[in-house]
Amino acid sequence: MAFDDGSCQYEHGMAQVDNYQLTFNSVLQRSWTMSEPTHDLLYRVSFEDRQQHSINVELWLFAESTFSLIFPVWTPGSYMIREYTRNIESVGATAHLERFGPAQATVRLARQGKNRWQGAVERPTQICVSYRLYCREMTVRTNWVERDFASLSGAATFPFVDRVDQPAQIELDLPADWPHVATPLPRIQDDSHKTLFRAETYHEVVDSPIVCGNLQQRQFEVAGGQHYLVNVGGEGLWDLDRAARDTARIVAGHQDFWGCQPYPHYWFINLATGGRGGLEHDNSTLLMCAPHAMRSRESYVDWLGLVSHEFFHTWNIRRLRPRPLMNYDYEREQFLEELWIAEGITSYFDDLALKRLGLCTVEEYLSRLSKTIDTVQSAPGRLVQTLRDSSWDAWTKLYRPDENSRNSRISYYSKGALVSWLLDVELQRATNGEVALDDVVRELGRRHQSSGYSQDDFDQIVVELAGAEVANWLGEQLANAAELDYTPALQWLGLSFEQPTAVDAADGPGAWLGCETKGEQIARVSCVLRGTPAAEAGLNVGDEILGLNGYRVHPDQLENRIREFEPGDEVQLLLARRHKLMSLDVCLGSAPESNWQLTFDPQAQQPAIAMRERWLKGAGDSTYRG
């Protein structure tokens, strides 16, 4: 199956990885030869101040009169205004008769808002804009530069000039001990440690992370396409051969799901330097994980889930986009209500793919789905914010969590994944297993890859494939902040939630306070959940809990001390609030239901068992199999 408009470059059946190729290959061995267009933008980056976490950038451009220098304020895939110009230390410009020639005059750059500068010249000339950039924020959407390596985000590093369709080149002046560069940009020249890349438009600049240093790399082939797994950090802790083999299976599975390979080559750039996260791009993804992520089974499956999630985005959000994101506006927010489709559906299929491809067990997959259920069910915000509003509010809320976030918000990632799962089941129930969410997503791609889609477009496909009743059900899940009903899905798939053992039931949960604390020496309240004994008693975020019923209580003892009481018991807390000692009377309660661990229902009948097996294996047009 391939998208009908022919936009995918390669059409194939089940991708074969039996003849999996794995080689060491320096990035610098791969080069292209192209002539240099006269008026391309040229960004020149030097790293002589890398130990001060700074880079120096020159931007060479040809100006005929006035020109505007425009820095993005956000990057696609991460929906928050990030104010990248806060890291610029200085900006200056000079005029030159020819590129790289001596400066003839200083060009004044006038500020035009927080992210714009404007310059003017009397006659056509070459301009060199120079600035120093501080790079010490290690995320997949910002910049990090140090002695050992650099990771650069296009939006956080490079401005555009007047328009976004102008070709550009990027020259890296690399330190002698940095032999490698990982980026999906095509290389057009290597000269000693200076390396030149080309982007057809500014969009490609933003879409192409750059990581350089002494990198570890594996190369593998799937369905004729070259793929690269590059690691920074984790030396001696990673089995890159195994990681590359498992990544190749994910590549093959997702290509088979979508029916095409829409890129010339693909880069998985993995920063095993701490933290977690990923950012999708057309021909690459930048990943972050702990250096020891391969040292435990759980953390490695987490990493595989991250790889699966970001690679699924190669289609769902990069090439199949909500209509508001068809043309990026790098200077302001682009609000949309379809992020539950872009991120929630991706968050559903990322782990399900691991099971279908044999990269995790049934038990591991159900455990991961159970954690998502627990995350949503333990957040009071699920009854406050709708899934549609969660998407719209991403720009102002999702990336700015605070002590009240769990009370007032819900994530379109986690709840979106659960609604996707429940929608998958509703589609199957309405069609007796003939239609699944796989089919809806692929049909959305066939129809709307070139035009972009809206929620109405998605709903229309649901109506056509499964009926208006399913579409109406979906509309209620998106528009209402109500409890999700898992019963139909459990019955259809022969699943149930585990019941407490006899010993657990006899012990009981004990009493419950309903707050979260942080601190090794003092239990400082970090979150007070809405509707809990702590909230009713007036416990505040920032309060330090020092004692319980007249006795000192250590932070690691607080929960167990509370559990020694019964629900309904009254206790007295000794607090320090803004350095003032005070006491607070609290009537303890019962902890809410938290038994969300999925398991096979021993009472399930054969039809449900058959549907469960089909769901876990994959069905529909695709031959997506483990």
Image (cartoon, rainbow, N blue to C red):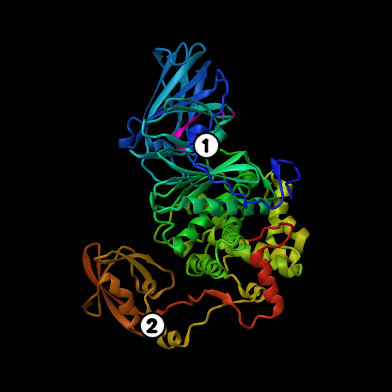
Q: Are marks 2 and 1 in contact (CB under 8 Å)?
A: no
**How many marks can you see?**
2
Three-letter amino acid code at disc 1? Answer: Val
Q: Check the image and report above or below for 531 versus 111.
A: below
Placement of the C terminus among the 4 image quadrants: bottom right
- In the rendered image, residue 162 lying in the magenta stretch gets the answer yes
380 lies left or right of 460: left
User: Taken as a whole, is the magenta stretch helix, strand or loop?
Assistant: loop
Span colored in magenta: 156-165
Residue identified by numbered label 2: 510
Residue 72 shows up from this direction: no
* Closest to the observer, 549 or 224: 224
| Quarter of the view holding residue 138 | top left
* Closest to the observer, 283 or 206: 283
Three-letter amino acid code at disc 2? Answer: Gly
Residue 206: assigned label: 1
Which of disc 1 and disc 2 is earlier in sequence? 1
Residue 549: assigned label: none
* Closest to the observer, 300 or 58: 300
Q: Residues within 10 Å of mark 2 (few under 14, many from 20)?
A: some
Q: Residue at x 27, y 65 (%)?
A: 520
| Quarter of the view holding residue 510 | bottom left
* Closest to the observer, 342 or 6: 6
Q: Residue at x 34, y 84 (%)?
A: 565
> Mark 2 against mark 1, which lies toward the viewer?
1
Residue 625 shows up from this direction: yes
